[in-house]
Image (tube, rainbow, N blue to C red):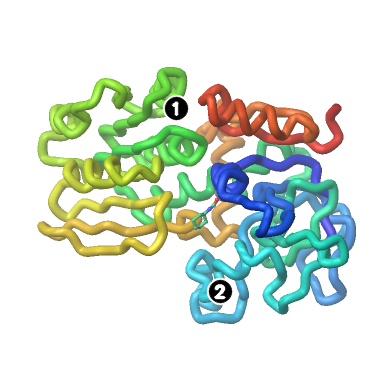
């Protein structure tokens, strides 16, 4: 699929890879929250055609057991497909320029992306692509962890450590699920204030410390579901310590750390909120249309050329979810 990219979100993984990058890796095109318009469809593609509006999500092989069961986030080739900087057949459309492409099956910091029908989700043409773009990774990850992975039931307690785009999507989803209390934790006061507006019943500024004790006063029997999104080992320890018996600690930022913990508690690493993008993203779009998932509260739009300023604003905690618009100067 050839897609003209109209807008793309910037996700923490893009920023982390910039930080970790060194010249020996060679140049790559990042970006994995693209949204755009189909320019050309491959001959065998049935469900999409030129002119369709699409959100680009993560890539998967489509052949392994997990993919066939409709669980592409568990694809046996997830890492090669998304972080290999080439297609699964080894080819790379940018090879002639010596640049790694196909990041998350898209490399969306571009004006045109080559993708696969499997990682595209059709969306209604009347909707603003610059708001839908971050559904492809960050927002799907946060909301999916609550609604697909944890399946938080009504009345259950939830704590969200880290209220960036992923965490705020989780807070909104927890409200949709009817969770209570919903405890948001962060170190940026503006993000905590927004978490309250989006559904958190409590917002704790962790610059004050004593987090476990403060959470215990809110949920004396412990918290049923903790989402750890900061990636800080200390936060993971606190998350485990505040869990209720049979509760789950979902590690959204650290892969491959599943474990059983005492008292029927468990720790699990979550990828992309266990989402099947073609099913889950339309559900989030419907929630957005009914004002229950207000993406616009998280997004700040920048012209493509301001990508470095957008990333700097995220690092400083000034912007939650930057979206680059390609045609904007
Ligand atoms: C994730 C994807 C799954 C593994 C950890 C990082 N990144 C998404 O931005
Ligand atoms: Zn991402």
C-alpha gap between disc 2 and disc 1: 36 Å
Where the N terminus falls, by quadrant? bottom right
- Between residues 268 and 278, which one lies in front from this camera angle? 268
In the image, residue 77 sits, relative to residue 10, either above or below, namely below
Q: Is residue 298 left or right of residue 145?
A: right
Residue 302 image position (x, y, % from top left): 73, 28
- Of 59 and 152, which appears nearest the observer? 59
Whether residue 52 can be seen here: yes
User: Mark 1 CB in 8 Å range of ligand 2?
Assistant: no
Q: Which residue is drawn at 31% across and 46% down?
A: 233
Position of residue 85 measured from the top left corner of the image (x, y, whole percent): 68, 64
Q: Residue at x 50, y 33 (%)?
A: 292
What number is the disc on residue 77? 2
> Which mark is in front, 2 or 1?
2
Residue at x 53% of width, y 25% of height: 316
Q: What element carries label 1?
A: helix
**Residue positioned 49% across, 49% down in the render:** 141
């Amino acid at each position: 699929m050839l897609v003209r990219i109209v807008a793309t979100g910037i996700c923490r993984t893009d920023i982390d890879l910039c930080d970790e990058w060194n010249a020996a890796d060679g140049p790559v095109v990042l970006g994995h929250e693209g949204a755009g318009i189909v320019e050309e469809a491959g001959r065998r593609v049935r469900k999409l055609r030129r002119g369709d509006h699409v959100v680009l999500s993560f890539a998967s092989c489509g052949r392994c057991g997990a993919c066939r069961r409709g669980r592409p986030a568990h694809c046996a080739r997830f890492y090669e497909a998304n972080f290999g900087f080439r297609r699964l057949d080894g080819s790379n459309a940018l090879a002639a320029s010596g640049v790694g492409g196909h990041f998350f099956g898209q490399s969306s910091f571009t004006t045109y992306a080559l993708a696969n029908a499997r990682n595209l989700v059709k969306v209604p043409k009347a909707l603003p692509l610059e708001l839908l773009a971050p559904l492809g990774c960050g927002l799907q990850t946060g909301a999916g962890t609550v609604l697909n992975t944890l399946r938080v039931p009504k009345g259950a307690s939830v704590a969200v450590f880290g209220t960036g785009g992923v965490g705020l999507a989780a807070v909104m989803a927890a409200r949709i699920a009817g969770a209570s209390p919903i405890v948001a934790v962060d170190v940026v006061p503006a993000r905590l204030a927004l978490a309250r507006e989006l559904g958190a019943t409590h917002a704790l500024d962790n610059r004050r410390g004593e987090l476990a004790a403060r959470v215990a006063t809110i949920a004396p029997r412990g918290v049923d579901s903790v989402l750890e999104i900061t990636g800080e080992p200390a936060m993971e320890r606190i998350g485990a310590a505040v869990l209720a018996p049979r509760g789950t600690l979902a590690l959204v930022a650290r892969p491959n750390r599943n474990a059983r913990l005492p008292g029927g508690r468990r720790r699990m690493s979550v990828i992309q909120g266990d989402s099947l993008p073609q099913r889950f993203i339309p559900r989030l779009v419907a929630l957005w249309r009914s004002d229950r998932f207000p993406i616009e509260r998280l997004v700040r739009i920048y012209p493509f050329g301001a990508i470095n300023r957008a990333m700097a604003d995220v690092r400083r905690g000034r912007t939650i979810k930057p979206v680059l618009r390609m045609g904007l100067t």
